Image: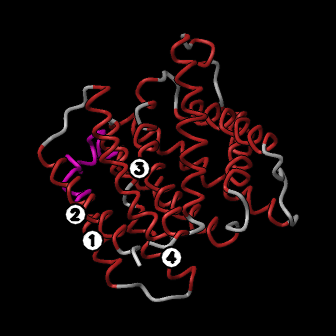
Amino acid sequence: MKSDQFKGLLSLHTASLLFGGTALFSQTIQLNAIDLTAWRCLIAGLFLFAWLKLKQQPLIFEHKHHYFGIIGLAVLVGLHWITYFHAMQVAGVTVGILALFTYPVMTVLLEPIFDRARIKARDLIAAVLVVGGVSLMTPSLNPEDPIAVGIFWGVLSALLFTLRNLLMKKYYRQYSPLLTMGWQSVLVTIMLLPFVTNELQALESDQWLQLLLLGTFFTAAPHTLLANSLRYLKAASVSLISCLQPVYGAALAFLILGEQIELMTLIGGSLIIAAAVNETLRKKA
């Protein structure tokens, strides 16, 4: 496997594991989706900029127009985080994270438009495999069921995430992922501050610690690793391999929160793993 591909895959698989754990905080931290996103981003942004300063790396972009672009990316990722946490708070960790993982299919279909290329049949096959796995793991589509509401917000979150990833890959791949994520995190905080409530004051000490972990180890780290992987791998490959996240999330939700894993969840998860493994093996050369 080529060195750059190995770097990309290592970053991506580590990010997937951490992202799987991120979902748990939607249930354990007693904040609404907007507050949770705002304070998470503030902690992540401060951490990333402090790290850049420590490493004596640039804190600014080379061109002025990149600042306008990063605002757009911040809007997309901020709305993605809000809708994602809301989906999990409405329907539970497993349903929310599974609905999000319609984004690999969106990426496979949209990336060729950005790159002006044809859609590859093997990517479509992998995408179909992922859709099959997600479908088996989704317990209900009843429009009056909270699960259906959670799926709606999760799918919307997936679209926002897809657009952010494709735009960042196309226009910001020359920058350090620490820089791009730092700016996005701080801008999301500024964007959401007018809408936050006073719920933060009611948090107990253990939840403050959880919020700190969410902002650093489970936000700054995995999003930076994901951005780093986009420098070496195609966005379609990144999104398909990232489909390990719902498997990690479901397993952690079972171990930590006691959420039960149904037989169909295991079968669907196996299909998702198969797609991710296939995409990983294709990178060997």
Across and down, in percent, residue 177 comes to 66, 55
Residue at x 39%, y 38% (from the top left corner): 88
Among numbered discs 2 and 3, the one appearing first in the sequence: 2
Q: Residue furthest left?
A: 263
Identified at 28% across, 76% down, the residue is 125
- x 19%, y 38%: residue: 261
- Is the C-beta separation of discs 4 and 2 under 8 Å? no
Residue located beneath label 1 in the image: 128
Report the disc number at residue 154: 3
Residue toward you, 146 or 202? 202
Q: Position of residue 218 (x, y in %)?
A: 52, 37
How far apart in space, not on screen, are marks 2 and 3 (Cα)? 17 Å
**Residue 225: x %, y % from top left:** 56, 52
The local crowd at label 1, few if under 14, some if 14 to 19, many if 20 or more residues have their Cα within 10 Å, is some
Label 4 CA crowd tier, 10 Å (few <14, some 14–19, many 20+): many
Q: CA distance from mark 2 to mark 1?
A: 6 Å
| Amino acid type of the residue that numbered disc 4 sits on in the rendered structure | Glu
The label on residue 111 is 4
Element carrying mark 4:
helix
Question: Which residue has dot 2 on it?
Answer: 132
Report the Cα–Cα distance between label 4 and label 3.
Answer: 20 Å
Q: Between 258 and 54, which is closer to the camera in this rendering?
A: 54
Q: Secondary structure at mark 2?
A: helix
Which amino acid lies under the numbered mark 1 shown in the image of this protein?
Answer: Val
Q: Position of residue 203 (x, y in %)?
A: 56, 14
Measure the C-alpha gap from mark 4 to mark 2: 21 Å
Q: Do the residues bearing badges 2 and 1 touch, measured as CB atoms within 8 Å?
A: yes
Real-space CA distance between mark 3 and mark 1, rounded to the nearest whole angstrom: 18 Å
The magenta stretch is 133-149
> Is the residue under label 3 in contact with that under label 4 (CB below 8 Å)?
no
